[in-house]
């Protein structure tokens, strides 16, 4: 990953190398942080952020659930994000807003603590590298996905990713590309950073929110595209053996985009990557890269908005 130029930190654009925090940062000790991950794509009309408002909406809802304070209105963060892309001069990138409890005395309570916010542009393309198109090998993890009475799976909280990191490391140690986590009651939940779709008898199926999945924005996008493409789709609990015998399967998310799954626990998945996966993948890239007029509504063009003057540092 090559460093970019600027990071937005608590209302200021700072140089990449100066974006530092103290070792006593509360978020580092107690995982008191929530974040987002979105992508800016290179489109015929210039760089555009995909579904930025939906990502920030989830960010604000997560903050509300955890009683974390965001000291900026959403419009300011969206303006800052566009400006950040312009100042870094990139056509495409991954964008990571993060809210965390900052430097303060030791102690778990978040009450009265300082909340800090950064927006980091990251130069990265394919999460699964060359396998993003050809497909990946998965295993069912021995680690269960966190459930709603432990930590909210619906919030992109840093703490949740310790659960993901355990499962991912187990999968990588065993020679797989990704882990599939089951919910506390044994239903298929999600990957360590992706939602899951399987195709069975012509129907696309994805686990419901109560099976511990993040309400993925890519997942919602794919559900809408599938309806538009007349592909039957449903949200229902999926059993482990239903993924072993799926006709097709793919993972999706902002980082993973649409990644076909070749096998799970060494059971090969039908035709791979199958025709439905290919069609969804193609439709997805047409949308995010601005080639589908019907979904321009989801693109937030970085250069279409009025420019802030160069000396505006504090938004
Ligand atoms: C655990 C988890 N599930 C699902 C997703 C997919 O969500 P989205 O499509 O909003 O990026 C992500 C990625 O952000 C994730 O980390």
Image (cartoon, helix red, strand yellow):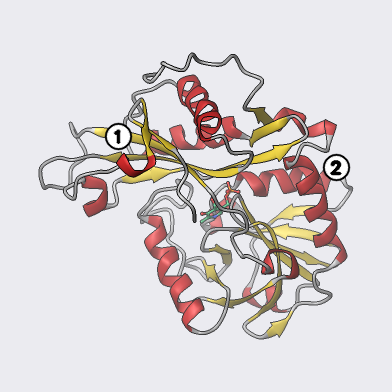
Give the number of the mark in front: 2 or 1.
1
Dot 1: element: strand
Image position of 195 (left or right of 68):
right
Which of the 4 image quadrants contains residue 70? top left
Image position of 103 (left or right of 231):
left
Residue that protrudes farthest toward the left in the picture: 105
* Tag 1 residue: 116
| Nearer to the camera, 151 or 293 | 293
Residue 54 screen position, x and y as percent = 58, 34
> Do residues under tags 2 and 1 come within 8 Å of each other at their CB atoms?
no
Please tell me which residue is depicted at 78% across the width and 59% down the height of the picture.
Answer: 204
Label placed on residue 305: none
Relative to 52, does residue 267 appear above or below in the rendering? below
Density class for disc 1 (Cα within 10 Å; few <14, some 14-19, many ≥20) is many
Image position of 178 (left or right of 294):
left
* Tag 2 residue: 228
Please tell me which residue is depicted at 59% across the width and 48% down the height of the picture.
Answer: 216
Relative to 27, does residue 272 appear above or below in the rendering? below
């Amino acid at each position: 990953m090559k460093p970019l130029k600027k990071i937005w930190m608590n209302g200021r654009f700072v140089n990449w190398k100066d974006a530092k925090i103290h070792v006593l940062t509360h978020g580092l000790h107690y995982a008191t942080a929530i974040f987002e991950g979105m992508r800016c794509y290179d489109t015929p009309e210039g760089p555009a952020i995909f579904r930025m408002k939906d990502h920030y909406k989830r960010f604000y809802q997560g903050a509300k659930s955890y009683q974390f304070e965001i000291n900026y209105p959403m419009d300011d963060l969206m303006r800052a994000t566009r400006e950040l892309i312009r100042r870094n001069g990139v056509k495409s990138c991954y964008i990571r807003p993060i809210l965390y409890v900052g430097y303060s005395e030791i102690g778990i309570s978040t009450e009265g603590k300082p909340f800090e916010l950064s927006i980091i542009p990251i130069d990265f393309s394919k999460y699964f590298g060359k396998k993003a198109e050809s497909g990946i090998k998965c295993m069912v993890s021995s680690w269960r996905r966190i459930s709603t009475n432990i930590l909210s799976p619906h919030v992109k909280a840093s703490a949740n990713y310790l659960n993901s990191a355990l499962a991912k490391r187990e999968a990588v140690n065993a020679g797989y590309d990704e882990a599939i986590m089951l919910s506390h009651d044994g239903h298929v939940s999600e990957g360590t950073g992706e939602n899951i779709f399987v195709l069975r008898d012509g129907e696309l199926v994805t686990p419901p929110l109560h099976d511990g999945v993040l309400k993925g924005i890519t997942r919602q996008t794919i559900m809408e595209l599938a309806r538009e493409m007349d592909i039957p789709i449903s949200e229902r609990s999926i059993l482990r053996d239903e993924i072993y015998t799926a006709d097709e399967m793919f993972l999706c998310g902002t980082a993973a985009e649409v990644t076909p799954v070749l096998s799970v626990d060494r059971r090969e998945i039908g035709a791979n990557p199958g025709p439905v996966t290919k069609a969804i993948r193609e439709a997805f890239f047409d949308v995010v890269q601005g080639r589908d007029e019907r979904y321009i509504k989801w693109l937030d063009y970085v250069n279409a908005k009025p420019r802030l003057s160069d000396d505006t540092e504090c938004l």
